[in-house]
Amino acid sequence: MRSESETDLRLYNKDLAPVAVSSRSWGWFAIFNTWCNASQSLLGYTLAASFFFSYGLNGWAVFAAIVLSGFVIMMLINLAGEPSVRYGIPYPVLARASMGVYGANIPALMRGIVAIFWYGAQSYVGSTAVLLMLTVYFGEGSKETFLGLTPLAWLALGLVCVLQVALFWKGIEWIRVFLNWAGPAVYAVMVTLLVMIWVKTGTSLPEQVGIVLKGHKQTIGAQISDFFAVVGTMIAFYAAIILNYGDFSRYVHTQRDMRLGNLLGLPVNITLFALLSLLISAGTIALFGEHLTDPTAIIARIDNDVLTIVASLTFFVATVGINVVANYVPPANDLSNLWPARISFRRGGIIAAAAAFCVSAAWVPFISVFGISKFVNTLGAFLAPAYGIMVADYYLVKKRTLVVKDLYDGARTGAYHFQNGFNLVAIAALFVSSIFSVSAVWLPSLEILKGFDWLISAGIGAAMYLVMIKVFSGALDPRNRQKQ
C-alpha cells in the first residue's frame, strides 16, 4: 500500500494546486482579451465573414444570431468558470469531483488530444501569414517541396512553432501579458486595413455593405433555419473552450471580474469582430470585384509591403493567441494531471507542442487530403456530456461545495475516491450519453443539429448522470457519499 506522500504525488504538483486569491493577477480586462484572442485567429475571421456571404440571411439577422450565440456561450462559460474562481482549481482537478480522482483523466485526455490536433492546425494556418511576410523579404525562393511545403514555408512553420513554445515557456503570467497586448493589436491592424480599403473604394464600400445587409429573398422557414445555423456554428466554434474554462478563471480575482470579462469578451467582442469582418470583406468586393474571406489573401492583393509585414506579424500573434487559449493550456494541464509527479505544466506543454508539430508537418500531404474532422469531432463528442455531468454534479449534487484537499487525495477515505478512484456512475453516464453526440458526427440525418448537438448532448449527459446517480447510488461507497 502506498504511503500518503506517495499517493499525493499521483495527484498533486504546484501547477495543479489551487491558486490562492492573493496570488491571482487576472481582472476583467484579461478575461476580455482571452476571448479576443479566441476569436481573432485567421480561421475566426474567415468564419465571421462567411456568415454574411454563405447564408441567405440579411446582415441584421446575422448580427442578431451572433449576439444570441454570444449570450448562450457566456451563460455556459459562467457556469463552467464559477467553481474554478471559487476554489482556484483547473479543469482536470474540478473533473475529479464528479469523475473520481483518477477517472478525471478520461475527459481530460480527450480534451487534450482534441486540443493538440487543433494546435497543429492553427500553427499551420499561422505559418501562412508568416510566409507572406518572409516572401516580402526573400522572395518566393525555391519551388522544391518536401511534404508539400517549400523551404520558405518550412522556415515559416518552424518559426511559428519555436516562437510559440518560447512564449508559453514563460508561464501563465507572461501569457496574461501577451493576451492583453495581442487582443488590441489585432483590432488595430483590422481597423487600419479597413481604413486603407475605404480610402481606395470611397462611397462604394457603404453601398456594398448595404447590399450585403439586405441579403437574399428567402422563405420564413429558410430564414429561421439559417438563423439557427449561425447560432449553432458559433456555439460549435467555442465549444472546446467552454469545458476547460476553469484553466483560466482560476486566476481571476472575483466572480464579478469573470462575468464582466465574459460579457465584454463574448457578446460584445464577437459582434464587433463580425462587424469589422463584414466591412473588410464587403470592401474586397468593391475593390477587387469578389469577396475575400482570407485575411492573408486580402493583404497580398493590396500589395503594400509595410502593411503586409505588420499584418502578417499581427495575424501570427492572433494565431498564437487562440493556441494559448484553446490548444496549449488545456493539454498542458491535462497531461500534467495524468502524471503530476513527472509532468509539470511546462513539460505537458512541450509534449503537446511536439505532437502538434507533427500534425502541422503532415497537414498538406495527408491531413488536408483525408481530413481530421471526423476523428477529432468524435473525440470532441464526449466533451459536451462531460460538461453536462460536471456542471450537474457541482451545482445540483455537490451544491457548490467541494472538499478541496480530497481532490488531491487518492486514499480510500477521500471524498472523491469512489471505486478505486473512478466514479463508475459518472463514467457510465458519460459513455452512454455520448451515443447521441457521436451519432451527430457520423449520421448525415443529424447534421441539421450542427452546433446544437453540443447543447443537447450536454443536457443528456446532465440528465442521465442525475438519474443514474439515484438509481445506482448503492454502488457508491456510503462513506464517500456522506463526505460529498
Image (spheres, rainbow, N blue to C red):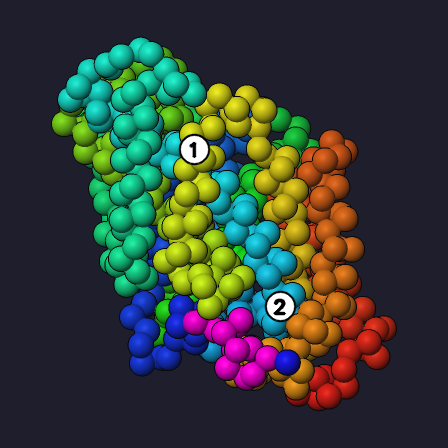
Q: In the image, what residue occupies the spot 27% across and 57% down?
A: 170
The image quadrant that residue 465 belongs to is: bottom right
Query: Magenta region: which residues?
Result: 2-13
**211 versus 382 height, above or below:** above
Query: How far apart in space, not on screen, are marks 1 and 2 (Cα)?
Result: 31 Å
What is the x, y in percent for residue 309? 18, 29
Q: Can you say which quadrant of the picture contains the C terminus?
A: bottom right
Q: Is residue 17 left or right of residue 372?
A: left
Q: Is residue 134 magenta?
A: no
To which residue does mark 1 refer? 360
Picture coordinates of residue 183, whole percent (x, y): 29, 49
The amino acid beneath tag 1 is Ser
How many numbered marks does the figure carry? Answer: 2
Tag 2: amino acid: Tyr
- Closer to us: 292 or 442: 442
On screen, 478 above or below 426?
Answer: below
Does residue 438 show up?
yes
Task: Determine whether the residue tagged by mark 1 lies in a helix, strand or loop.
Answer: helix
Spot the residue most to the front.
1
* Residue named by callout 2: 102
Q: Are marks 1 and 2 in contact (CB under 8 Å)?
A: no
Residue 290 in the figure: left or right of residue 399: left
Judge by depth and name the residue closer to the eye, 394 or 140.
140
Q: Quadrant of residue 248?
A: bottom left
At 66% from the left and 51% from the top, the residue drawn is 382
In the image, 167: left or right of 79? left
Q: As drawn, which residue projects farthest toward the top?
A: 143
Residue visible at 44% across and 61% down?
Answer: 343
Q: Is residue 269 visible?
A: no
Q: Secondary structure at mark 2?
A: loop
Q: Earlier in the sequence, mark 1 or mark 2?
A: 2
Give coordinates of residue 319: x percent, y percent: 35, 40
